[in-house]
Amino acid sequence: MKQMIMLISMLLVQGMAMANYRIGGVVVDGDDASPLMGATVVLLDTNNRQVAGVTTDMDGRFALKEMASGDYVLRCSYVGYESLTMVLTSLNRHVDLGEIRLSPKSDVLAELVVAGEQVIRKIDRQLVMPTETQKKASTNGVSLLQHLQLPNLSVNPLTKSISTNYGESVQLRINGVEVTQEEVIAIRPADVIRVEVHEQPGLRYGGAAMVVDYIVKRRESGGNVSADLTNGVSPLGFGDYQLSGKYHQGKSSLSALVQWNRRDLEWNRENEETFRFPEKIITNREVVASPNRIKYDYLTTSLNYHYANGEKSMLNIALRNNLKDIPHSFTDRNSMLYQEEKIYEVKDREQSKSIIPSLDIYYQLNLKNGHHLYFDVVGTYLGSDNKRTYSMTEQGQTPVEIFSKTEGDKYSLIGEAIYERTLGDGKFTTGMKHNQSTMNNVYQGNALTKVSMRTAETSFFAEYQSRWEKLDYTLGVGAMRTYYIQGKSKQEKYIFRPTLNLSYPLGKVFLRYNASMSGYAPSLSAMSDVEQPMDTYQVRRGNPALKSVTYFTNRLSASYRTRGVSAELSVRYSYDDNPIMEETLYEDGMFVRTFDNQKGFHRLNLQANLQLQPFNQYLSISLSPYFNRYISQGNVYTHTHSNWGFRGSIIGMYKNWMAMMDMHTSYHELWGETINKGEAIHSIALGYNREKWAIQAMVMNPFTKDYHQGVENVSRLAPNKQVAFSRDFCPMFMLNVSFNLSFGKQKQTASKRINNDDTDTGILSGSK
């Protein structure tokens, strides 16, 4: 192992020959100055015998005490980094060595290589070092994550969305700053130093299922302009376009981003419904009369100002806006409905618009001795407008028509404060968050209804993270209070939130376990005291009596890594107590789709992952079979559902070329009385990347003519099946072009740690 020799001469100034002294310092990453937790610091005498040894704490700090005066050798080491040796001569006083920088190794240790990655485990996260080949084969931060083939992560090649394999959203960060998917797309892969994966993030990250943090090089001056442009070739109605830019000047930087997602495609929807009236049973079968158009434009813009006063403090101000315009909804349809001997023509049209501007002010203060303070305040306005027309016409008869219109206004304020400090060999974190909102919705149609609601949610947490011998652990405790008022209805609930995370290496097998209890409040739309017609047989009704829910979850996983092979097996069980789920009632000749606190909901998820690298880093294979089991216990029903599935990908990379094949089967989720059946897709991509530009061609579903999504409701009174399918996706050819032009030097700045937003408009929809 290569060693760097540093000579520190210490002059004798005062003291006794037999006095004892202390040696301290902090070990950090040589690239970005981030603390290296768990680094080994050993003190040797002149005969190369160990005198003392410690490991660094959460902030990379260490202290060696009770050293007699004399000559010593200090050696610092950390897996994946070059070791550093210091010669200390004539020790005769307390010494603070300050920052000790370790450089990442240029070679990769064999036992840590997994599918072309270098993986370094820390107490609270994994550090994944992308290879140069993986960087060259990637066009942005999302594609780089896809090429890393990380276990338990899924990247949708069509939408570029990132989720866990359980379908949960992943919290994304850049240098500790929570960001959006659009900002990750703007990352230049060549600037990525490493990717930090928090698989057990705990309360510190708001109970997120997983946190992915990109550590990237930072600029000192100048700026960059980048673009990522994707458009369908066949069909032309698919487009994702992003343009971003950043400029640095001294301690300040200014960045802007524009993301436009557009769709103008043809979909077909077919439904089968059964209505069990007390005196009769009616069965409706809808088939496509003519293709239905889905069209929408999503425009996301952000303007961000960042000021960093070295490592002391940081101010970040972000102004964002999300605009959604949907003139033709996914639920639209033109169909012929067959009901015994009768034939009806059905037309369903829904239009919606929303605008969500927000202002986010964040401040971070780094104090002495490992103390940190973080503050975040976000104000948001949500304005929405929704229209729906539905008609059902029997041949030769007057049509039955339904019209509804909803206008909504919502104002919210979110405040959060977090305090961190080093405590012994561990880290202590505590924080509080408060969310206050006011909503006013006006529903027009057969009747005029106004809904006003005030809600509040307050949470508190405290966590301690440390290591005992080989066992890494995090203990957390928290509480949350939910409150809302609607008319004369008021509700308040307190929920206890403990967490436990454990990690333990057992030879080449790494064991992880986490358990937590938390809760969630009902959605604003579900609580709305309003009723919306769906069709001539059904209405959707809110329930202002809904109560907040407590849920429990725990997960156990075992992973194995060696040269060219990585395997992981995980099992997760979770339970929702009195969950807010749907139920169907029959009242006054109509079937009412509503919500209530049901008895319970059980989930069991079993997943395996195997990664192979048969030809070094040039070929990577990932195979992930899974099994899901759901038990939905309602007040008047019990439903179960099982789903076997598979995900797999093969990625080949050579110099500037990349080829990839990806596929996954339909992922099913049961909730209440509804089974959502996701898309089954496969894709092939071929790309060529240069330093400043890249081009990639991709085809979706080249080997099938059947692309569909499905929803099945299994209620006793009114079961139904809905299938949506499109010929535009079988196959679908797309072309992606990207570029990133930058200038200026790198610099190191403090990182923003927390971010909050609000996107729940609270609108109760009557669409099917």
Image (tube, rainbow, N blue to C red):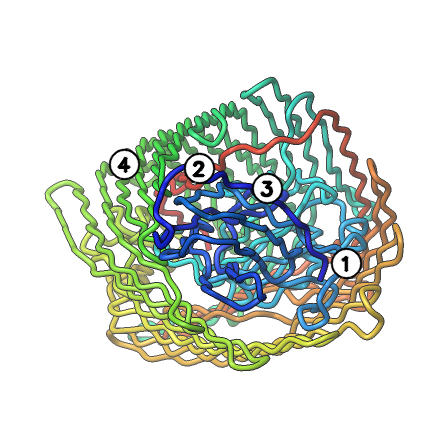
Q: Is residue 175 depicted above or below 107 in this figure?
A: above
N-terminal-most mark, 3 or 4: 3
- Identify residue type, mark 2: Asn
Q: Nearer the viewer, mark 1 or mark 4?
A: 4
The residue tagged 4 is 437
Across and down, in percent, residue 688 comes to 87, 48
Contact, mark 3 vs mark 2 (Cβ under 8 Å): no
Q: State yes or no: discs 1 and 2 in contact (Cβ < 8 Å).
A: no
Reading the image, the residue beneath label 1 is 700
User: Which residue is farthest top?
Assistant: 249
**Spatial separation of the CA atoms under disc 3 and disc 2:** 48 Å
Contact (Cβ within 8 Å) of mark 1 with mark 4: no
Count of numbered marks: 4
Residue at the image position 27 percent from the left and 53 percent from the top:
462
Q: Secondary structure at mark 3?
A: loop
Type of amino acid under label 1? Met
Pointer 3 residue: 32
Residue drawn at x 33%, y 47% as measured from the top left? 525
Mark nearest the camera among 1 and 3 is 3
Of pointers 4 and 2, the one earlier in the residue sequence: 2
Mark 4, mark 2: which one is toward the viewer? 4
Residue denoted by label 2: 386
Q: CA distance from mark 1 to mark 3?
A: 39 Å
Q: Report how far apart the C-alphas of labels 1 and 4 lie in the structure.
A: 42 Å
Mark 3 vs mark 4: in front: 3
Residue 81, position as x, y percentages in the image: 64, 56
